[in-house]
Image (spheres, rainbow, N blue to C red):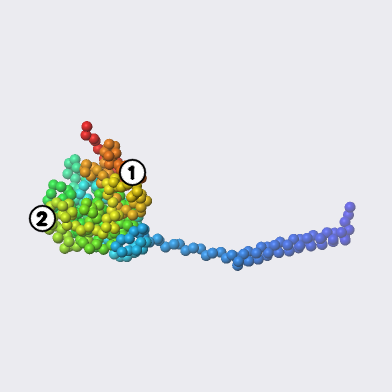
Amino acid sequence: MLLTGGQISMAVTSSVVFLFTTLLFLSGYVLQQQTVRNMQAIIHPTPPPKPSPPPEPVRKKHLKLFGRPSGEALDVEDPKWSRLAYAQLGHSHMHVCDSLMMFAALKHSKSSAKRVYLYPREWEEMDGSGADAEKERSMRMIRKARARYGVEIFPIDPLMDSDSASSAYPIEGLLALIQYERILVPQPSGLLLNITISDTILEAVSQHPIAATSRHPGAFILQPNELSAQNAMTRLRLDSDSAVIRTRVYPLLDSDVADVIVDSSKLRSLPSTYFNGTQLAEMAAYVRLDDFNDLALGPYHDVPRSLKSKARPRDTEVRDIWEDLYETYRFQRMDICGLDLEPVFEAT
């Protein structure tokens, strides 16, 4: 069937009208959607991107020391931090790992204070004796402290003529570090739990060249200067037993500070009604693990189960915290120093 001219003209006209109608509809739809989006943007504007928060300042929680209100930030950018330091004086190979663990905790917590380690110069001298293995192990950990944790290391000669290493290298030797205004010296062996608090103690002004936190101190604060170093050495020459001198001469720190330096042996007598494990973790700056000191054993020894059961606190909550402290020490000793606990053999 042949189409007439009128039918062809009608088909072409219809096609053109349909095409333009479709285009008109599509352009209208696009314009409508754009208008809707513009209106939504006006009604609900996109919030500007949040700026990156500034580094959170070091804060001290739930603590009031030396008149500083709780929660007030420590100014870690203050140049005085270059004159504040944590220090250790090594005189026993057994305690080198303790110091390394402390420096690792300070590095991990980003404490702004300097880190200093003094050790006997003789540890650098290998003489072919059986002590060479211990010396090499200690020097390896000391070099690791310098390279990994930014510790300043200084070899020293004996300060006193004594067969006892602790008397030959007394803590008074740290008073010679006159480039520092104050030094905090945690005593081995233990764990730094809250470095924000220990930084606060270090930042506070001590009124004495040497201050202790208890009569058998878990930590000392020193203010080195030439006069205090000379006075200390004079006292040592008069009485070579520096431990006696400390208990007799050194003043105590404020009671608030004494409360944040904890001996683990004190936990044994605490009933749960007077004990809060969460509070211990938040408030204690340093816990010295001293339960077996009277047996000449430390947390670095694999204490026999029979001895450990006698020292273990009876209260369930206190015992759990006590066991966790020793397990944490054991784990850190292996993780940081690569050392297992030293074996102990019970007498038969």
Residue 305 in the image: above or below residue 157: above
The quadrant where residue 259 appears? bottom left
x, y percent for residue 22: 74, 61
Q: Nearer the viewer, residue 310 or 323?
A: 310
The answer to whether residue 193 is above or below residue 228 is: above
Question: Could you say where residue 263 lies in the image, as x and y percent from the top left?
Answer: 27, 49
Task: Name the image quarter holding the C terminus.
Answer: top left
Q: Residues within 10 Å of mark 1 (few under 14, many from 20)?
A: some
Of residues 18 and 161, the one nearer the viewer is: 161
Write the residue at 13% across / 49% down: 162
Secondary structure category for the residue under label 1:
loop
Residue at numbered disc 2: 238
- Numbered-mark total: 2
Of the numbered discs 2 and 1, the one sitting upstream in the chain is 2
Three-letter amino acid code at the position of disc 2:
Leu
Disc on res. 301? none
| Label 2 element class | helix
Question: With 224 as the anchor, is 13 left or right in this view?
Answer: right
Task: Check if mark 2's residue and mark 1's residue have beta carbons within 8 Å.
Answer: no
In this view, the mark in front (2 or 1): 1
Q: Is residue 50 visible?
A: yes
**Alpha carbon distance from label 2 to label 1:** 46 Å
Q: Position of residue 48 (x, y in %)?
A: 52, 65
